[in-house]
Image (spheres, grey):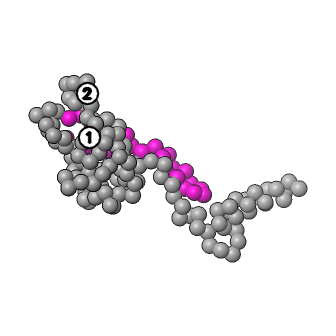
Amino acid sequence: MRILATLAIPLLTLQACGGGGNEPTACAAVVIFHEPIVLVDAVAVEGETGTLSRVMITDLQRDGVPVGLPLLEQSTAIVQTADGLECSVPCALGTTEGTYTFQLNAPGFAARAVSVEARYAVFKTGCPTSYSGGTHISASMRRL
């Protein structure tokens, strides 16, 4: 009986993921991103206790290649405008690991260059594969 249970569990696992029968498994294509990879948690005002609730993200690049919102796989609290990507802080974007560079802009503030090596902290293989634990950043901007 113990041998039967040892064989049945892996077989049931394969069937639950779409494998184990004559059909091809689709599970390998299922990937879940629990959150975007770049998370802008806060934008502080230098020398003050306040924070900014909205900033514009411009000149967004990933590994030196320009990226626009339509190419980003996932974003939160970001809207594309004629001036760039409007971020309602906190906001988040992307699911592809790499070096993200961009400018933060806000009326009355000097632009702030940001560079972040974005990686997920948790990668779980299996059925489905999942990513979580994006890279959190905070920035500060100086009044003009």
Q: Which structural element holds mark 2?
A: loop
Distance (Cα) linking label 2 and label 1: 12 Å
Residue indicated by mark 2: 50
User: Looking at the picture, which amino acid does disc 1 mark?
Assistant: Arg
Instruction: Kindly identify the residue that appears in the image at 51 percent across and 55 percent down.
Output: 32
Residue 100 appears at what percent x and percent y?
Answer: 30, 50
User: Looking at the picture, which amino acid does disc 2 mark?
Assistant: Gly
Q: Overall secondary structure of the magenta stretch?
A: strand
Q: Which picture quadrant has residue 109? A: top left
Q: Is residue 125 above or below residue 134?
A: below
Numbered circle sitting on residue 86: none
Q: Which structural element holds mark 1?
A: strand
Residue farthest to the right, as pictured: 1
Residue indicated by mark 1: 54
Instruction: Kindly identify the residue that appears in the image at 25 percent across and 24 percent down.
Output: 49
**The N terminus lies in quadrant:** bottom right
